[in-house]
Amino acid sequence: MRAPSASGRAVAGLEGVTVRFGSRTVLHEVDLSVGAGEFVALAGPNGSGKTTLLRVLLGFIRPSAGRATLFGTPVDELPITERARRVAWVPQEEANRDNPTVREYVGYGRYPYRGRFQAESAVDRERVEESLSDLGLGDRGDDGVQTLSGGERQRAVLGRALAQDTPLILLDEPTSHLDIGHQLDILERVRTLSRRRGTTVIAALHDLNLAARFADRVVILSRGRKYDDGDPARVLSEGLLARVWGVTADLRRDPRTGVPYLLPHQRVVEGPAILAGPGFGPVHVVGGGGAGAPVLRALSDDGYRVTTGALHLLDTDAETAEVLGIPMVVEVPFAPLGAEVRSAHRRLLEQARVIVVAPFAVGPSNIANLDDLEPFVPQTPTYLLAPTPIDQRDFAGGAGARAWEALRSAGAREVDGLPALQAELRSLEARWRSAVPAAAPALPS
């Protein structure tokens, strides 16, 4: 049974919430009130505090100051089981080490309603089947979760939350690592289910245009502070993108819906004298959708000169590169990589001493990144980070897997994680330095 919301009382709220991790303040005196049935999007650059805010509402993080409430009750006063009956959680990523059937996995959402040794009830089974049907997974119920595609797995995670039958659902980057078709599918389903069931939704979204398209309200976070909060038609502006994201854009409106969207100007960012300066490199990282961000941070911390691209503007990897000052090539959001961007990307590939391919989701808009790599592989050491098989990340109808195999055939090497990659780079750097001749003494004048 759903927990009812009291009249005039917020479903979820923050009152002056501040969160500190050591000397770093992640949220600064944030106030937020979300009413019944609202779909609220949290948007902001990386590091703005979106995930932290959600974790405070879940009770995973205790505020350093202020308080969080669910239906008027402080979160830390709610027993875990009661909390699980009020709010469901869809995390950004979830590793499935076992392989339950999709029906069993969605059924995990019913645990808050059963005793420790109690078998599932008719109501439990009804809620599970309803969730499978709502999310188009009715024919996959007996299949293992690990057999699902990326988009289907994300629907299964959402299905588990729906089966939990809570009046509030929190989602952390539910479209992360999905191509645009699956992003639109997931958010359309969330909005439809929210309106049909009256469920309140708070979703952290890195893409401002998606937030404006699907949410009733957009809350903008910047450097841990609430920057703006309101109707997307008012909040979205060219000035907002310039002030918060540092990006120039034109404001347009969808002629069919009247929904505003921002069209960032195409930028090709290429650092001057990329080959100059201390440190081994350039090491060029091909990524997207957040898959390249850990690689960019690790290699920058290791002292390598790093470049990246081609990325889509507002992509998590592009934001990471911007913060780290990494030269990159970027395209406007969602668009296929254009001729100018691909040409600029190939110039970075020509300068690269090493190429690293992050385990990004491959779709129609970015498959050109793999296609353009093949001519460079025979003469440039190329490493394919492959913690997950390419067929689980291929949303281009098999073209991604074929391009990946072509890179392997051309000489690219698969490595299973960052530590293995870093070991390979250290070995390459040592061989390179031993082969570099010592500088000749200056001639006397």
Image (tube, grey):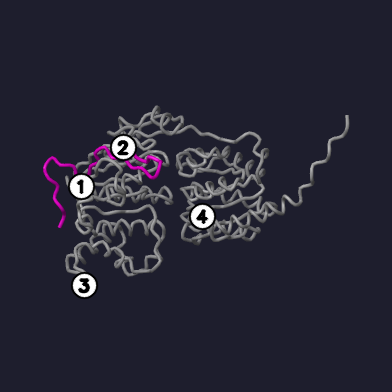
Q: Is 344 in front, or is 52?
A: 52
Q: Are marks 2 and 3 in contact (CB under 8 Å)?
A: no
* Magenta span of residues: 1-28
Kindly tell me whether residue 37 is visible in this rendering: yes
The label on residue 117 is 3
Which residue is drawn at the image coordinates 37% and 68% (left, top)?
Answer: 144
Which percent across, then down, holds residue 215?
Answer: 29, 41
Which percent across, then down, holds residue 136?
Answer: 31, 59
Could you give the CA–CA distance between mark 4 and mark 1, rounded to whole angstroms?
Answer: 40 Å
Task: List the residue tagged with mark 1.
Answer: 74
The label on residue 359 is 4
The label on residue 219 is 2
Residue type marked 2: Val
Around disc 2, counting alpha carbons within 10 Å, would you say few (fewer than 14), some (14 to 19), or many (20 or more)?
Answer: many
Residue type marked 4: Pro
Q: Is 403 in front, or is 302?
A: 302
Inspect the magenta stretch and tell me whether residue 13 lies in it: yes
Q: Are marks 4 and 1 in contact (CB under 8 Å)?
A: no
